[in-house]
Amino acid sequence: MDPQAELRIVRAAYAKQILAAANVDDARVAAAFAAIPREDFVGPERWMMLAARG
């Protein structure tokens, strides 16, 4: 699979997760989240992830 196709799949999955967490059911919002290349805004790799406990 080419990298751009893989990114489209990942973006669409992220959009579904965010909308589900926010209890939003709007295809336009999902399309907007899926279209934004967020990876362009986070800087170079080696990102630290924090998880809430409890």
Image (cartoon, rainbow, N blue to C red):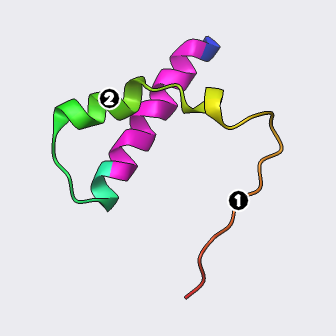
Q: What element carries label 2?
A: helix
Q: Position of residue 4 (x, y in %)?
A: 57, 14
Q: Which mark is residue 49?
A: 1
Q: Which amino acid does label 2 sit on?
A: Ala
**Which quarter of the rendered picture does the N terminus lie within?**
top right
Q: Residue 36 carries which label?
A: none
Which residues are drawn in magenta? 4-18
Q: Residues within 10 Å of mark 2 (few under 14, many from 20)?
A: few
For the image shown, how many numbered marks are present on the structure?
2
Q: How crowded is mark 1: few (under 14 residues within 10 Å), some or many (20 or more)?
A: few
Of residue 2 and residue 32, the one placed in the foreground of this image is 32
Q: What residue lies at 34% left-to-right and 44% top-to-bottom?
A: 16
**Looking at the image, is mark 1 or mark 2 earlier in the sequence?**
2
In the current view of this chain or complex, which residue is farthest to the left? Answer: 26
**Which quarter of the rendered picture does the C terminus lie within?**
bottom right
Q: Position of residue 45 (x, y in %)?
A: 80, 37
Q: Is residue 53 left or right of residue 22?
A: right
Q: Does the magenta stretch include residue 8?
A: yes
As measured in the structure, the alpha-carbon distance from the residue carrying label 1 to the one carrying label 2 is 24 Å
Q: Is residue 22 left or right of residue 53?
A: left
Q: In this view, does 22 lie above or below 54?
A: above
Q: What residue lies at 46% left-to-right and 27% top-to-bottom?
A: 9
Q: Is residue 34 left or right of residue 1?
A: left
Q: What residue type is labelled 1?
A: Met
Name the dominant secondary structure of the magenta segment. helix
Q: Where is residue 30 in the image (x, y as percent from the top left)?
A: 28, 36
In the current view of this chain or complex, which residue is farthest to the bottom? Answer: 54
Residue 31, located in which quarter of the rendered image? Answer: top left
Q: What element carries label 1?
A: loop
Residue 3, located in which quarter of the rendered image? Answer: top right
Q: What residue lies at 52% left-to-right and 15% top-to-bottom?
A: 5
Q: Which mark is residue 32?
A: 2
